[in-house]
Image (cartoon, grey):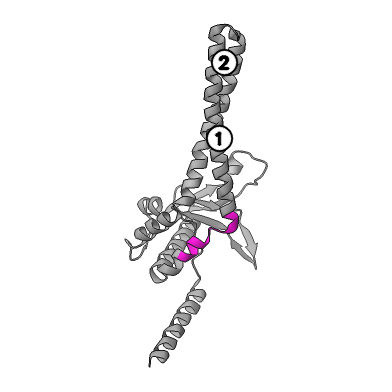
Amino acid sequence: MTNNYSREQAYFFCSSYRKNTANCTAHYIREKVVYALVIESLQRVLFHIQAFEKQFVQEQLDKSSEEQKKELAKKRHELAKSEKRIAELDILFQRIYEDNVSGKLSDERFSIMSANYETEQKMLKDSLIQLKADVEMQDDKTANVSAFIDKVKRYTEIKELTPAIVNEFIDYIMVSKKQVIDGKTVYPIDIYYSGVGIINAPSAEEYEEMFQERLKQKRSKEEKTA
């Protein structure tokens, strides 16, 4: 972010462009635009959960599509495979050490082989950390949703963004290159909320339809019991 004198002029540059990657052209978004988009999204999310908590929980759990389940199974398989290989490398290292001590393996050869084993094992252990995090995140989906709802219930409304609120509710934000749709400039933005990811809260029009449907169902029940 570059701050030039005032918040009105403050803006965020695309990090990929700053790194001179070939995948991105120069573009930026003003801080006040990000602020407005984030607070509007957060307000809609809070209202959605407060008004339709059960529906929100079901929506989040339904995100575990068949494709995601397959991906999780794949990661569990990779996790088991990596753990097995790490254990095998420990055994192999012990063997070449014994061979070196007994004179069956030269010091030079031992140095090369041990360095290769250590490099492979380090790479496996590094990837193991991410794999475990991915698996735990999927396994803890229900707990994450419940924790997020508990945070929402601590607020009746949010009128401004503070560092504490942002840190509590949001993991990170991805802003894509601006687009012009029907003559209007729009900024595709994805907000990843803590523990639950992207939340697509309904629009005002969709809320009206949902409330009308709820009233319809309530009247239907009342007529049946009358």
Picture disc at residue 20: none
Q: For the residue carrying disc 1, how many other residues have a C-alpha within 10 Å: few (<14), some (14-19), or many (20+)?
A: some
Tell me the kind of residue under disc 1: Ser
Range drawn in magenta: 58-68
Residue at the image position 64 percent from the left and 67 percent from the top = 183
List the single residue furthest toward the right: 22
Residue at 51 percent of width and 74 percent of height? 206
| Circle 2: element type | helix
Pointer 2: what residue?
96
Q: Position of residue 117 (x, y in %)?
A: 57, 22
Q: Which residue is mark 1?
A: 82
Residue beneath the point at 57% across and 15% down: 96
Q: Earlier in the sequence, mark 1 or mark 2?
A: 1
* Prevailing secondary structure class for the magenta stretch in the rendered image: helix
Q: Quadrant of the C terminus?
A: bottom left
Mark 1 → mark 2, Cα distance in angstroms: 21 Å
Q: Is residue 174 magenta?
A: no
- Decide which of 113, 44 is in the foreground and name it: 113
Instruction: Give the quadrant of residue 18.
Output: top right
Q: Amino acid at mark 2?
A: Ile
Helix, strand or loop for disc 1? helix
